[in-house]
Amino acid sequence: MSVPALSTQGLSKSWGDFKVNSDISLTLAQGARHALIGPNGAGKTTFIHLLTGYLKSDGGDIFLAGDKITKLSQHARVRRGMARTFQINTLFPQLTVLESVMLSILERKGKATIWSRPLASMKEEIVEARNLLESLRLRDEAQYVTQQLPYGKQRLVEIALALASCPKVLLLDEPAAGIPAAESAELFEVLSALPKDVAILIIEHDMDLVFRFAEKITVLVGGRVLTEGSPDQIANNAQVKDVYLGEAEHV
């Protein structure tokens, strides 16, 4: 049996007496396409913050490829193979798309200090960046300044920056938020085509997108795991319909 790409055991976080996450145990298989869903306030984003080290847990453990990373810093977790996006874009607004991805590649290689050199002199990194942009359907936008792009394309650029770190686990916090339906469908087509050596955990409120993308879904309610299963199992679970899918207007 292969080692999970990511797993947690009893992960918990409280703010005073309020338990935001309570005893969450979740397993993300290698190459997984896994969705985390639940009502507003269920603790989904807090859980991502705990995984990445943005917040410190009050209890439980986190394992990346079988290694305990509970006490590692955010940067150390990135170096070990974890990357994420945020609900709100975190881009380099004045750089072109190609320059942004190049900077992330150089950071991964420990070469960010040579950024002042002419871009054309970094041939190896240029090839890597262009190949990555090609895979995300961003080739035609390579020379655009990121802040000039449509919002859906900006979300793809943010994913490109995350992938430039060569992660084994990619955490996506509402990647389709604020994107028109046509653009969000394209975004999820791109995500579905990513290499299977990258396991993806996604938080998303658009249930149509979730049910098309995910192979496994975990439902979080009140900071706890309510249930977990395949898209069909979740869609037909009466308790999930009652506490969440009815609210999300899923038919």
Image: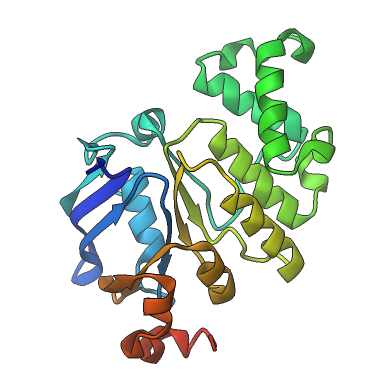
- Quarter of the image for residue 93 reads top right
> Residue 175, position in %: x, y?
58, 58
> Residue 77, position in %: x, y?
35, 34
The quarter in which the N terminus is drawn is top left
- 183 vs 47, left or right, is right
- 5 vs 251, left or right, is left
Q: Is residue 251 above or below residue 80?
A: below
Residue at left offset 31%, top offset 46%: 6
Q: Is residue 100 above or below residue 63?
A: above
Residue at left offset 78%, top offset 33%: 96
- Quarter of the image for residue 137 reads top right
Residue at left offset 60%, top offset 37%: 161
Task: Name the residue furthest front.
Answer: 1
- 174 vs 60, left or right, is right
Q: How is the image coloured?
A: rainbow
Looking at the rendered structure, the number of numbered marks drawn on it comes to 0
> Residue 111, position in %: x, y?
56, 13
Judging depth in this view, the residue of 113 and 207 nearest the camera is 207
Judging depth in this view, the residue of 105 and 118 nearest the camera is 105
Q: Is residue 129 above or below residue 13?
A: above
Q: Can see residue 178?
A: yes
> Residue 97, position in %: x, y?
74, 35
The quarter in which the C terminus is drawn is bottom right
Q: Can see residue 56?
A: no
Residue at left offset 66%, top offset 51%: 155
- Quarter of the image for residue 160 reads top right
